[in-house]
Amino acid sequence: MAVCTLQFHGEAIQKASSMNVIFPHNPEFEGPFSVLYLLHGLSDDHTIWCRRTSIERYVRELPLMVVMPDGGRGFYTDAVEGMAYERHIMADVIGFVERMFNVRTDCLGRAIGGLSMGGFGSMKLALKYPDVFSSVVAHSG
């Protein structure tokens, strides 16, 4: 298993953005991999899941890639005046992951979850885009 931080340009938000990614590392897992998108809360960023949970240990034996993007303080919603964090997740983040890595690109290969603001965002995105995610979990949304 490997954990890395990726920096990329978020077209929807017109600024640099980051995400932490956990890659499965087991010779038995060849891919394409399913992806879990984990969204952070209001006072956190893309690093919180690795810093405050045992997410690496939880997924160590799974054929699963975990993507933890930076959602700023935008509630994963497109602001009328401001940044477009919904489009950022749906186009920039998912698009980047699916272009760059050997992952499943069908609904059954994607799940989304989050905590607090991220719980709200994960429920909102999963309900708005039911053909994109097969599973959703919200903690304290």
Image (spheres, grey):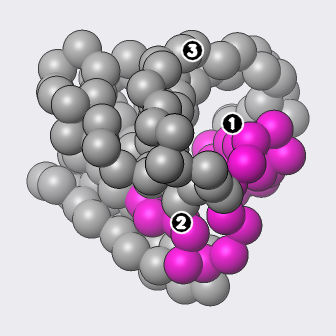
Question: Horizontal and vertical percent for residue 38?
Answer: 40, 45
Range of residues picked out in magenta: 85-112
Disc 2 from disc 1: Cα separation: 28 Å
Q: Is residue 8 magenta?
A: no
The reply to whether residue 74 is visible in this rendering is no
User: Which residue is at a point 68% across and 36% down the rendered structure image?
Assistant: 82
Could you tell me which residue is drawn at 62 percent across and 50 percent down?
30
Q: Which residue is mark 3?
A: 5
Residue 89 in view, yes or no: yes
Residue 52 at what x, y percent from top left? 17, 20
Q: Quadrant of the N terminus?
A: top left
**Mark 2 or 3 closer to N-term?**
3
Q: Spot the residue most to the bottom.
A: 131
Earlier in the chain: of badge 3 and badge 1, it is 3
Please state the horizontal and vertical placement of residue 101, each as a whole percent of the image. 74, 41
Residue identified by numbered label 2: 110
- Name the amino acid, label 1: Gly
Q: Secondary structure at mark 1?
A: loop
- Identify the residue position indicated by label 1 in the image: 82
Instruction: Give me the C-alpha separation between circle 2 and circle 3.
Output: 20 Å
Dot 1: few (<14), some (14–19), or many (≥20) neighbours within 10 Å? few
What secondary structure is the magenta-colored segment mainly? Answer: helix
Q: Secondary structure at mark 3?
A: strand
Q: What residue is shown at x 52% (from left), y 49% (from top)? A: 29
Front residue of 29 and 120: 29
Q: Amino acid at mark 2?
A: Arg
Residue 95 inside the magenta-drawn segment: yes
Residue 24: image location, x then y, percent: 47, 37
Badge 3 density bin: few <14, some 14–19, many ≥20, Cα 10 Å: some
Q: Quadrant of residue 121?
A: bottom left
